[in-house]
Image: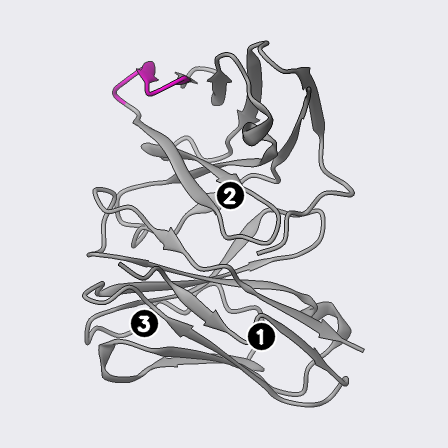
Amino acid sequence: GAGVSQSPSNKVTEKGKDVELRCDPISGHTALYWYRQSLGQGLEFLIYFQGNSAPDKSGLPSDRFSAERTGGSVSTLTIQRTQQEDSAVYLCASSLAPGQLYEQYFGPGTRLTVT
Amino acid sequence: GESVGLHLPTLSVQEGDNSIINCAYSNSASDYFIWYKQESGKGPQFIIDIRSNMDKRQGQRVTVLLNKTVKHLSLQIAATQPGDSAVYFCAETYMGATNKLIFGTGTLLAVQP
């Protein structure tokens, strides 16, 4: 079946503009995660959604970052007033359910460049 | 996802040799560990996992070793192949962490034919 998909694959934006990044998880997966991968660094957790529960936003770096998940499926990560330090690859992952027993499947990522 | 290559530790091996990739983890409460492989332009892909009640786990051509005393994890790849060339990340998590993963910085494995 189809894996996790993300769009766009690449996004170049000017400093100060808002951007929206989209994630389509694997059908039937109830848990969805966003991570950020900066150059020379590992992946950094941003936010986690599970069903209708309140999301775990503990990894969002500032209030310019927000995310939503509509209908328990597609998720959008929004970055307002982008800064150059926001340049990174943004990765989405989904799993069948929360918890360690369930593997997280990653999408190919969106490469964001803020000029 | 892009492989993050320029500033990563690099391990260069000859095809057919065994590779050992090391990782130090930070949280003594972590009880579950995963190795991921990330090829250029792709997201991380699960390789093998291990729980803290184990010291060793074997998969197909891969073995993960866990030393909780020194908080060290290693991934051994037997008979390394050109297709194994990628960035390898270890990740840790613990019960109650909503399964969010804490990743290491990664190691670039370069397999020479």
Q: Nearer the viewer, mark 3 or mark 2?
A: 2
Residue closer to the observer: B95 or A43: A43
Quarter of the picture containing the N terminus of chain B is bottom right
- Cβ atoms at labels 1 and 3 below 8 Å apart: no
Q: Chain of mark 3?
A: A
Crowding at dot 1, Cα within 10 Å, few <14 / some 14-19 / many 20+, comes out as: few
Q: Quadrant of residue A87?
A: bottom right
Question: In the rendering, at what x and y percent does residue B71 appear?
Answer: 47, 22
Mark 3 on the same chain as mark 2:
no
Q: Is residue A1 left or right of residue B14?
A: left
Q: Which residue is mark 1?
A: A62
Residue extending farthest right: A115
> Would you say residue A51 sits in the magenta stretch?
no
Residue closer to the observer: A51 or B58: B58
Image position of B32 with respect to A94: above or below: above
Residue closer to the observer: A93 or A50: A93
Check disc 3 and give the amino acid type. Pro
Residue at mark 1 to residue at mark 3: CA–CA distance: 16 Å
Q: Which mark is residue B61?
A: none
Mark 1 on the same chain as mark 3:
yes
Q: Which residue is mark 2?
A: B103
Image position of A92 with respect to B94: above or below: below
Segment colored magenta: B53-64
Q: Chain of mark 1?
A: A
Question: What residue is drawn where x is 26% and y is 58%?
Answer: A1
Residue at mark 3 to residue at mark 2: CA–CA distance: 20 Å
Image position of B70 with respect to A101: above or below: above
Q: Which residue is mark 3?
A: A55
Question: In the rendering, at what x and y percent does residue A2 appear?
Answer: 31, 62
Crowding at dot 3, Cα within 10 Å, few <14 / some 14-19 / many 20+, comes out as: some
Residue extending farthest top: B17
